[in-house]
RNA sequence: GCAGCCGUAGCUCAGUUGGUUAGAGCACCAGAUUGUGGAUCUGGGGGUCCCCCGUUCAAGCCGGGGCGGCUGUACCA
């Protein structure tokens, strides 16, 4: 009864194989990002996939659930190790460990795989790539402003058009200051503050009314699931809602938003709003007005003022550098990671929509983010070390670029290698010699290594996307020749041939040349097909 | 984590009130063509019907439990 059972070939959930087209597209995209980062003076540095769990911070494994959120295992000395879940914490460890040897401020970049042991979803994987740039040792918000500008330049470098993205900027101190003004200070409100931040973070998805519900009693979604709210008093909700409203520009009085149907002279300062009927209007974005509006919401405290001053400084810096407010935009609803950001936070968002698989328009949303983490390096040292950085979600950005068919990823699909077919199995060395001649001329080439006959070999070459097949049987060998078959031209010719007899007789796009001319003639054929 | 939907060939799916040896299209392999990709025709390989337990003379189908997938929600450093 026990038939030999074959192993089920399968991949764990949340992990993905990547084919040659993906690899090529990713590499081109990474090169564009790297080029921009280096233009800004950042230098590469790489750290391993594995760190001591304690170095990564938040997730100290306990004995019951050591792999909650992060993949962890024990070293042979029983110390806990983890796969990194971002590139920031390992960088902080690296900088702290090499602090004296590094120039300060230290500017570096790195691309790499990170791992999260949590539920994957569309566009969310348990292994994915990030591409970070960080400035460590610079307390000035000029460092933050620069990172925002670099983020904008990077998106354009990979083919996102101006107007199709926005770098949103906020400041943790502003959020803290507003919560302080709402009476949410003190340790006893720590949990409530988290709930408030989470609610604000959902503005995009739930809208202002959803956020109000989460600030109050709670919210029940369509599926009937109930999310408990922060339980704030009406006047607290009012303050926070009007704060968040400044983000959406709902209170046009506050942000002094100007709306026009004319194409603006300075499009970089205007947000484009597209209606379903195809018409569009333009709304002027005024970063300084947003900051003023927040300042006037309540009796300001020191934390709030400090945060607003930093935002003002960033807004002024990017404006002076020619980045309009629709490109780098102050947005009080940006929250980002709850754990370690201490000052300015940024989020790179794509604003265009594309038709999804079901035909419904879908947005890609955030493709990157970052912020100031002044406390992270300091965990390893007796003194605080200011730092700020930005991270691009490589896989998500790639998916977006593929959706808009950016040239950087669609780039001419490279053809396969030239395949030398094997006619005489007892004369392998002579076939291999032909391959060697092609390779010596810099032409990608291989000998067919399977066991099948000529027809199958042709199908193999076809499936590999080979531009050219080389055929040398005993007849050709006797004459000192090879057949060169142009597979791309042949495929075109095949379309007008109906019968098999005709097909065989025609032998389209195939010619015989002396062996010594082979390389030269193959180069000719490759040249006709764009190299 | 919680809730809902779904698991039949590599893929997309059919499968009658529970009834013999579980099917189709596509894909794959081979032949028609001693040595030529496509099309056509012919043939072939491939299934623990997600798993286990139960009900029954009899389970792909009914019941219970588990596992896996999708969607929403929570979390997201």
Image: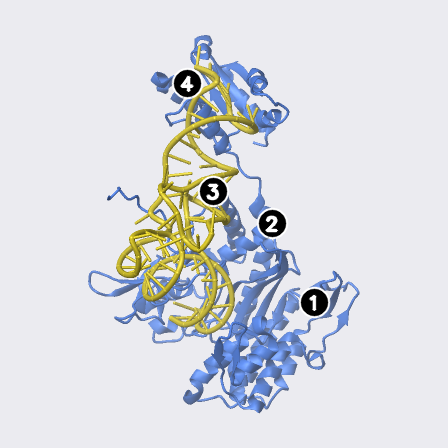
Chain colours: A blue, B yellow
**Marks 3 and 2, Cα distance to the nearest angstrom?**
17 Å
Image mark 2: chain: A
x, y percentage for residue A49? 35, 57
Q: Looking at the image, which residue is at 54% across and 51% down?
A: A32
Query: What residue is pinned by disc 4?
Result: A423
- Which residue lies under the disc numbered 3? A20
Which marked residue is nearer to the observer: mark 4 or mark 3?
4
Q: Marks 1 and 2: CB-CB under 8 Å? A: no
Pick whichever of labels 3 and 2 is earlier in the sequence.
Answer: 3
Quarter of the image where one finds residue A254: bottom right
Q: Residue at x 55, y 39 (%)?
A: A413
- Label 4 vs label 2, nearer the camera: 4
Q: Is residue A211 left or right of residue A458?
A: right
Q: Return the residue at label 2.
A: A406
- The answer to the question of whether label 4 and label 3 lie on touching residues, with beta carbons closer than 8 A, is no
Alpha carbon separation for disc pair 1 and 2: 25 Å
Name the quarter where the C terminus of chain A is drawn. Answer: top right
Residue A369 seen in render? yes
């Amino acid at each position: 009864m026990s038939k030999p059972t074959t192993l089920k070939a399968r991949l764990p959930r949340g992990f993905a194989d990547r084919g040659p087209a993906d690899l090529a597209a990713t590499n081109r995209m990474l090169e564009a990002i790297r080029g921009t980062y280096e233009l800004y003076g950042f230098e590469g540095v790489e750290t391993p996939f594995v760190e001591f769990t304690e170095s990564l911070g938040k997730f100290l494994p306990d004995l019951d659930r050591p792999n909650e959120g992060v993949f962890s295992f024990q070293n042979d000395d029983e110390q806990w190790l983890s796969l990194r879940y971002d590139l920031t914490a390992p960088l902080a460890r690296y900088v702290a460990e090499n602090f004296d040897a590094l120039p300060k401020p230290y500017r570096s970049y790195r691309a790499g795989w990170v791992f999260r042991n949590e539920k994957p979803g569309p566009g969310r994987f348990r292994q994915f790539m990030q591409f970070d740039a960080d400035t460590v040792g610079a307390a000035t918000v000029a460092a933050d402003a620069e990172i925002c500008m670099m983020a904008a330049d990077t998106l354009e470098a990979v083919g996102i058009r101006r107007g199709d993205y926005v770098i949103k900027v906020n400041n943790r101190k502003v959020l803290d200051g507003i919560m302080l003004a709402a009476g949410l200070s003190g340790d006893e409100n720590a949990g409530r503050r988290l709930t408030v931040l989470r609610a604000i973070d959902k503005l995009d998805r739930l809208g202002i009314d959803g956020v109000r519900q989460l600030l109050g009693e709670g919210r029940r979604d369509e599926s009937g699931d109930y999310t408990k709210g922060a339980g704030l008093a009406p006047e607290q909700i009012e303050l926070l809602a009007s704060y968040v409203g400044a983000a959406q520009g709902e209170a046009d009085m506050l942000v002094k938003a100007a709306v026009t149907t004319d194409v603006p002279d300075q499009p970089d300062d205007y947000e484009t709003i597209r209606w379903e009927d195809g018409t569009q209007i333009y709304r002027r974005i005024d970063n300084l007005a947003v900051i003023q509006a927040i300042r006037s919401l309540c009796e300001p405290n020191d934390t709030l003022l400090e945060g607003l001053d930093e935002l003002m400084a960033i807004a002024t810096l990017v404006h002076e550098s020619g980045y309009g407010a629709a490109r780098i935009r102050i947005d009080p609803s940006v929250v980002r990671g709850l754990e370690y950001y201490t000052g300015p936070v940024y989020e790179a968002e794509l604003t265009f929509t594309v038709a999804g698989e079901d035909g419904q328009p879908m947005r890609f949303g955030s493709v990157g983010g970052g912020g100031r983490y002044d406390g992270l390096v300091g965990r390893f040292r007796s003194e605080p070390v200011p730092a700020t950085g930005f991270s691009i979600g490589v896989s998500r950005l790639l998916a977006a670029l593929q959706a808009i068919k950016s040239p950087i990823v669609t780039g001419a699909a490279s053809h396969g290698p030239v395949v030398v077919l094997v006619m005489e199995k007892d004369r392998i060395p002579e076939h291999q010699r032909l391959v060697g001649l092609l390779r010596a001329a810099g032409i990608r080439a291989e000998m067919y290594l399977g066991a099948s006959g000529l027809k199958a070999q042709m199908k193999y070459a076809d499936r590999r996307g080979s531009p050219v097949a080389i055929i040398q049987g005993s007849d050709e060998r006797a004459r000192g020749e090879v057949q060169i078959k142009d597979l791309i031209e042949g495929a075109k010719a095949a379309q007008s041939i109906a019968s098999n007899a005709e097909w065989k007789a025609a032998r389209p796009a195939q010619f015989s040349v002396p062996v010594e001319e082979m390389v030269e003639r193959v180069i000719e054929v490759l040249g006709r097909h764009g190299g």
